[in-house]
């Protein structure tokens, strides 16, 4: 089923393998991330690899495609991680790097205990700042690409950027306050960025 698209768009085997590797990282009973290097690898496998394949399908040149996939993929996945911290903790998953937690004085290792530590806010702010910078870098790359080729990426960026802003406004003390976009907001993003 993939033979035709692989040949037509020159899709690379290593990107498909990265996606599978990312699925294998997640297919465990308990997840802990050791450091930022492992977090970046995880983001590359579960998000940026999909972006690299997509950029080839949308015929974005390799230089811009590689940059867009890396920056936007990381931004999207870091936003997902921050949004889903409580849900992941309930499944014994913690994607915040252990070395960063330790540097902020968080000594617990159980995800629910980590989220209860007041120092968690500093760690989340660092991750949120990285995501914010990656969104800015992705936007700069998209500005150099033909608009019709980056519409899907633009819509995803606009939606997730709003989620990140809301997470940062809400803060990291009350995980029970959900952060999501309304149907109207999603429709507005499609109309504003997907059709023009």
Image (cartoon, rainbow, N blue to C red):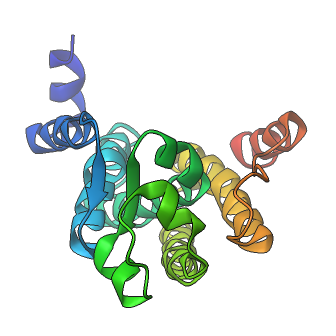
Q: What x and y, as percent, mark residue 39? A: 30, 64
Q: What x and y, as percent, mark residue 65? A: 34, 58
Q: Residue at x 77, y 64 (%)?
A: 166
Q: Is residue 187 left or right of residue 57?
A: right
Q: Residue at x 60, y 48 (%)?
A: 156
Residue positioned most to the top: 1
Q: Residue at x 66, y 64 (%)?
A: 164
Residue positioned most to the right: 184
Say which of 186 and 67 sits in front.
186
Q: Is residue 125 left or right of residue 11?
A: right
Q: Residue at x 35, y 64 (%)?
A: 109
Q: What x and y, as percent, mark residue 71? A: 41, 67
Q: Is residue 60 left or right of residue 125?
A: left
Relative to 11, residue 107 above or below: below
Residue 145 shows in this picture: no
Relative to 25, residue 165 above or below: below
Quarter of the image with the N terminus is top left
Q: What x and y, as percent, mark residue 170? A: 79, 68
Numbered circles on residues, count: 0
Residue 119 shows in this picture: yes
Task: Determine which quarter of the picture holds residue 82.
Answer: bottom right
Task: Determine which quarter of the picture holds residue 175.
Answer: bottom right
Say which of 144 and 194 sits in front.
194
Say which of 70 and 148 sits in front.
70
């Amino acid at each position: 089923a993939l033979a035709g698209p692989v040949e037509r768009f020159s899709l690379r085997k290593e990107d498909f393998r990265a996606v599978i590797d990312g699925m294998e990282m997640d297919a465990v009973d308990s997840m802990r991330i050791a450091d930022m290097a492992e977090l970046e690898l995880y983001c590359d496998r579960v998000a940026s690899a999909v972006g690299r394949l997509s950029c080839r399908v949308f015929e974005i040149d390799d230089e811009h495609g590689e940059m867009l996939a890396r920056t936007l993929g990381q931004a999207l996945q870091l936003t997902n991680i921050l949004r889903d911290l409580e849900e992941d903790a309930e499944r014994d998953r913690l994607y915040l790097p252990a070395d960063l937690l330790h540097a902020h004085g968080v000594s617990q290792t159980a995800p629910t205990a980590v989220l209860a530590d007041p120092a968690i806010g500093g760690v989340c702010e660092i991750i949120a700042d990285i995501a914010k910078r990656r969104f800015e870098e992705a936007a700069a790359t998209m500005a150099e690409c033909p608009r019709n080729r980056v519409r899907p990426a633009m819509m995803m960026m606009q939606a997730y950027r709003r989620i990140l802003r809301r997470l940062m406004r809400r803060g990291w003390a009350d995980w029970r306050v959900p952060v999501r976009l309304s149907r109207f907001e999603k429709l507005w993003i499609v109309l504003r960025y997907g059709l023009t």
